[in-house]
Amino acid sequence: MTSRHVTAPVTRGGVKSQLPKELLNASLFPWESGSSSTFFITHLSTMNLTTVEKTLEGGCTCRTVRYRLTSKPLIVHCCHCTWCQRETGSAFAINALFPAEDVIHLNEEPITIKIPSLSGRGQIIARCPRCSAAVWSNYAGGGPAIRFIRVGTLDEPGETVPDVHIYTSTKVPWVVLPDGVEVFEEYYDVAKVWGKETSERRFEVLERVKSGKGV
Ligand SMILES: [Zn+2]
Ligand SMILES: [Zn+2]
């Protein structure tokens, strides 16, 4: 896998043309233009949402991409692999996994970019078309059925705690994991670990991925 596999950004849906003029004209840097009053407008659609406990929301830096999560995460990964370290420029990445249909975009759609991945099958990253912040990814295993929400883009990221720490064989030495957390040196057996919570929802998503509908 080399950088030759990177493809150009693709805009999905052409939603930008439907955005109100004040949002399209808003500056990415409102503190420079004084346009902050129009910049932070959020356009909510009327939708039937199934709320499970607290509804999580998040988005990019410039608020062009805002999302709402209509269910609880299937699982939350803290990934210590060298790919996540390199892509984030940090020690690890935290991803909360959701069925794609439970990730509702409230404003503009992100653009998707394919990049190389550890599996060799590529990763799709959804980025804001204006500020380029990455909000979620698809990996080959779950395909488009599962979106890996970047927990740092949640409005309150501290509330979403990792269930598992993965690829700890490459964890940086100064990160000390809390007692009692589930740790895997590489990846884990999805059916086994997800099976610990025997909710129908997890089972349905796994079946969809296995059957190839989500891949
Ligand atoms: Zn943005
Ligand atoms: Zn990783």
Image (spheres, grey):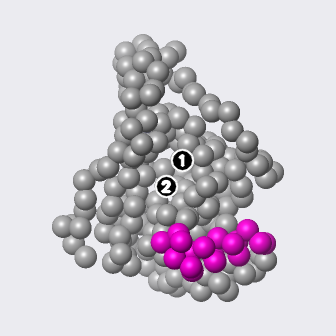
Residue at the (72%, 81%) spot, across then down? 195
Q: Is residue 93 above or below residue 21?
A: below
Q: Is residue 120 above or below residue 61?
A: below
Residue at the (25%, 62%) spot, across then down? 6
Q: Position of residue 91 (x, y in %)?
A: 45, 64
Q: Is residue 62 above or below residue 80?
A: above
Residue at the (62%, 31%) spot, across then down? 44
Left or right placement of residue 78 versus residue 25 in this view: right
Q: Nearer the viewer, mark 2 or mark 1?
A: 2
Per the rendering, the mark at residue 141 is none
Tell which of 210 and 131 is nearer to you.
Answer: 210
Mark 1 lies on a secondary structure that is: helix
Q: Main secondary structure of the magenta part?
A: helix
CA gap between label 2 and label 1 equals 9 Å
- Compare marks 2 and 1 and give the one earlier in the sequence: 2
The kind of residue on which mark 1 rests is Thr
Tell which of 61 and 191 is nearer to you.
Answer: 191
Q: Position of residue 201 (x, y in %)?
A: 73, 68
Q: Which residue is mark 1?
A: 153
**Would residue 208 be counted in the magenta stretch?**
yes
Disc 2 crowd rating (10 Å Cα; few below 14, some 14-19, many 20+) is: many
The kind of residue on which mark 2 rests is Trp
Q: Which residue is mark 2?
A: 136
Q: Is residue 99 visible?
A: yes
Q: Position of residue 191 (x, y in %)?
A: 65, 84
In magenta, the rendered stretch is 199-215
Seen as rendered, the residue at the extreme left is 4
Left or right placement of residue 174 versus residue 56 in this view: left
The reply to whether the C-beta atoms of the residues labelled 2 and 1 are less than 8 Å apart is: yes
Residue 121, image quadrant: bottom left
Q: Position of residue 140 (x, y in %)?
A: 44, 73
